[in-house]
Image: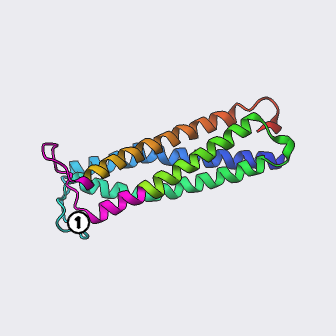
Amino acid sequence: MLLQSTGRFLFILGMSLWLGGVVFLGYGVAPVNFQTAETWELQGDNPHLPEQPVNYRTIGGELTAGAIERLNHIELAGFLLAVIGLAINWYPRWNVSNNLIIRTILLIVMGMLFFYYSEIIGARLNEIRQTVPLDFTDNGTNQLPAEQEEFDRLHSRYTLLSSVNALFCFLQLALISWVQGNPKSG
């Protein structure tokens, strides 16, 4: 009973940490970075790409990119806590339930999505951001360079996949909350 409770606690802690991090970035970090940079009319020079036009969107994006790297660490910690919690809940074998199987499959999917958006998409976004002088001052009237179109496309995909994982975190919390009456089933 204590072992199962520990596993359940670690799983809930992991999902809560993951979901909380994503929600805080989307609500508390990114909008604040961009709004502050715009309100303060921040400008400057990119020390790594001096030819890059810099305005509030460039600065807000740079600040948010640093926060996203930290968020990925929080997401990884949440994932690992959830994996440990689930592993504990799989022991002993008589404890296996449909709920546990569903949560395990869902966590595997979440891990694959997380790896894809944080390591593959995120790495490419950082590579473009650090090597190509993107122009976020463009008002949409000019043809965008291929790298900027790729950046915009990957950014949208990253946002979508991390949002899907946030919804999956919420679903995971709902699933573990609705464990059938037997405390051994979760």
> Could you tell whether 132 is left or right of 78 in the image?
left
Quarter of the image with the C terminus is top right
Frontmost residue, 2 versus 185 = 185
Amino acid type, callout 1: Asn
**Residue at horizontal 38 percent and vertical 49 percent from the top:** 29
- Please tell me whether residue 127 belongs to the stretch shown in magenta: yes
How many numbered marks are there? 1
Residue 134 falls in image quadrant: bottom left
Q: Is residue 63 above or below residue 174?
A: below
Q: Where does the image place residue 18, in percent across and percent down from the top left?
A: 55, 48
**Residue at horizontal 47 percent and vertical 55 percent from the top:** 118
Frontmost residue, 182 versus 32 = 182
Residue 126 falls in image quadrant: bottom left
- Please tell me whether residue 51 belongs to the stretch shown in magenta: no
Quarter of the image with the N terminus is top right
Highlighted range, magenta = 122-147
Q: Where does the image place residue 90, in percent across and percent down from the top left?
A: 78, 47
Q: Where does the image place residue 49, in percent across and percent down from the top left?
A: 22, 67
Q: Is residue 45 above or below residue 175?
A: below
What secondary structure is found at the residue carrying circle 1?
loop
> Could you tell whether 128 is left or right of 27 in the image?
left
Frontmost residue, 7 versus 120 = 120
Q: Residue reaching furthest front?
A: 146
**Residue at horizontal 22 percent and vertical 49 percent from the top:** 38
Frontmost residue, 121 versus 163 = 121
Q: Where does the image place residue 75, in percent across and percent down from the top left?
A: 54, 53
Q: Identify the residue position indicated by label 1 in the image.
A: 46
> Could you tell whether 49 is left or right of 164 in the image?
left
Circle 1 Cα neighbour tier, 10 Å, few/some/many (<14 / 14–19 / ≥20)? some
**Residue at horizontal 66 percent and vertical 34 percent from the top:** 175
